[in-house]
Amino acid sequence: MRLRLRSILGVSFTLLLVAASAARAQVDPDSLYRSVHPRLAFTRADVLLMRARIHDGGADDAAYATIRTYATSLYPLQSLSHMMSVSYGLGVAVNCGLVSFLDDTNPRVARDAGRRFTLALADSFQADSDPFYTSIRLRCLCYGYDTCMDDATQNERAYVRGEIESYVDSMMVAFNFERWLHPPYVSNKTAMTGAALGIAAICLADEMGPARVSAALARADTFVNTWIRYHLDPDGACFEGVQYGAWAMSHLAWYFEARRRYDGVDYSKRSDIRKIERWLAYETLPEHGGVVNNLNDTSYLNHPLSRENTYLEWAMASWKSGVSAWLWDRMLGPDGYDAGALQDHAATVLWHRAVAPVDPGTLLPRSLLWKERGLYYYRSGWPSHGSDSDDVVFTFYAGPFHGGHSQEDQGSFTLYAYGSRFAADNGFDAPNARSEAHNLVFIDGKGQHHSGSSVGTDGVMRAHVLTPYADYLLGDATTAYTTYSPYNAPGVPFPDDDWSYGYFGANPVEYAQREWLVVHDGVLPPCFILIDDVKKDESSHTYQWRMHTDGTHTVDLGANPVRIDGTRGSMLIDLLHPAFDTVTRGIEAFDNTSVDPDTRVITLSQGAERGLFMMVLRPSGSPAATSQTTSYPWGGMDVIEWPGATDIVVAHAPTDTVAVDAPFPGGTVPIRTDARVAHIRRRGSEPVRAVLVRATTCDVSGTPLLRSHSGPVTVIQAGAHAYIDRSDANFRLYGPGVQTLQAGDTLLTFRRDGDYIVRDRTPSAAGTIALRVYPLPATTRTTLVVEMGEAGTATVDIFDVAGRRVRSLWNGPLQAGRTLLPFDGRDDLAHRLSSGVYFARVRAAGRVATGKIVWVR
């Protein structure tokens, strides 16, 4: 199969070479040079405007001053090896090229340095089968040729041009590049290859011949779109984490800009590419120094967005991104980190814009799940400029292995709050392949199957319900303990592939599930309810619950709750089950071998036929809370007293119905339920709020809260809004103030029976379409309710009174029934709409419905 593929590619490309040679025979390529170059990042016509921008007092002024120093004072004195020692020489050619056009005193110094570097690079290396270094060298050759060869001789330009063509020839047919189009090879190297090949095709678009250029561009887009397909969630999260995602985009953004200039193909219009910035906002920790969460192969202190800032600059120029402007301030501004020569200063010069930063909290929900990646984030908010905030950041991961540096610690979690890494991941460097680096359950001293170096394990997010009040998630890591990913089977994806170096460490289990209930009403501090349920087999084993915390924290294991004291607050772990005095508790140092601070591992161990751990994690700043925990053979109960509110948590293993009397100010509250987790919140005279996970029945103080007649459901009842995980369920729910009922984004109909809501499953008439908007008028957010009689593809757009479209809100499939589409009052460029009247329009199956929006600022 491999020989046949090589043969086909070789014959096809030989024909293209013949056609290209004929085209070159008619036109001398060198005679075109000054008329078509530079073209990749700017043209000669752009120079006057660029010179004005670098003297207007913006961030690009400082960036230009830096690269001017490099190009005129450092590079002329350095050897090729020294130039290549910083980011492999990626910035040298483009830095010299920019200064050679923008310097109005002595541009020849920079141009000569760039020409010398480009010629030395062409003379010292040849195209090889290493996609990483080949891609970097080709990109350097292209920008050197494009911007630094005005004063070169005809033979020198021909020499560099020939080298670029030889790289293109190799990358088009060499089998080791084909490998990186197939998982598990697909990774940031796939993006690098596509970007470099596309840049080369555009660079020599008038010198290689149209057929050859078209073939190279098509091949480049195959690489780029393969990376997007396998390593980018539709909502913008890169499966390899921030470090490798930012590195991939530091190559792709240069190609995207060159491509837009060349033929108008604009990758910046893709929603998944634009949403990368939103994912990065979640990953950014709420402290100074440009730090991001330590997940995947991303280091806490490696400052990836301060070094690979390319995407942020490009986003500000491409769609005037306020979120990227906010991230830039946090990563590279006064709150950030100075990466020095590692920073992409050229991108700042070219693309940085004076865009008003947009606080991500005004655009993004507190919680988000990237479904294809299997990554969940909760954030209480984002810090304002100049502050280290007390915001809480929580993550949970259970997703499939996609290849490359995909996250391998299935079911791990992190928790950052009040300036402290209370639950830290160590997913960087060598420990990435070891379960002991992550927050997991061990069985007889062993964790999950070995992973790392392109060997991965699979997890899955089996259930989730996300609401403004609380979120429920069920992650399954059974296969991660038991075996490796199917992508690592012998002979996959090619017959000679051998992944046997990773075939060790398996720890087969019957099941391994981790459930989280995250309660976050925005008023009280969030709390995190955890159930770990792991079973290896019918025999008795030692099950050990493990959590890493920063090595500087003070940990008290002497009482329930376990207490961890950090920088500006604490975290309390209320152990519900097993009973605290039956658990062996321990703490030990952990060397993570990376630049990050070392951690310590808190362990809770029990001997049983099944590992069942139930606990509540409570970051504690202000207001403080007290708790009372009771353990039972079937699970446990926690009563948490907040100032002005009481939480009752009942968690149990799958049994029938349990009954407990929860202590409450002034008496007790009888609770009877079969819920996996029941969370009841009472606050003064407010109606009770409840979260019932996988339940059919629940009574509180004799009042039936839930009766489900079609199996277990997960319901969240929070004041005027109720949520359920199953739109097909028949149930009766206590909700005297409930006004809306949702399943995901779909608004469900229901009927009232006194203080109860009862699911009304009468379907809408086929072929109907309707649209309404609430609230009206709107001040900060509004919701479009789209009702479809049958499933189909729909577009939903917002127009101003002049009929101009200001926002494309939806373009894709909608299910039958009611769907809620939140609208934040911003246009497609994230600018706030001014006060006034706007109109919403939905089109589906040839039918149209409209609605009016009144916006009041």
Image (spheres, helix red, strand yellow):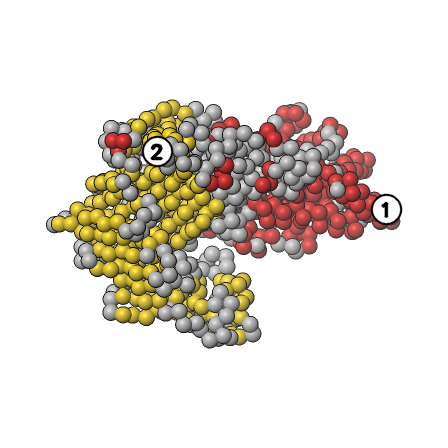
- Type of the residue with mark 2: Ala
Q: x, y percentage for residue 580?
A: 26, 33
**For the residue carrying disc 1, how many other residues have a C-alpha within 10 Å: few (<14), some (14-19), or many (20+)?**
few
- Type of the residue with mark 1: Val
Image quadrant where residue 7 sits: top right
| Residue in the image at 27% along x and 47% along y | 650
Q: Nearer the viewer, residue 506 or 531?
A: 506
Q: Is residue 560 above or below residue 643?
A: above
Numbered badge on residue 608: 2
Element class at badge 1: helix
187 on left or right of 332: right
685 on left or right of 652: left
Image quadrant where residue 247 sits: top right
| Residue in the image at 60% along x and 52% along y | 267
341 on left or right of 836: right
Q: Is residue 661 above or below residue 505?
A: below
Q: Which residue is disc 1 drawn over? A: 18
Camera sees residue 744? yes
Mark-to-mark CA distance, 1 and 2: 73 Å
Q: Quadrant of the C terminus?
A: bottom left
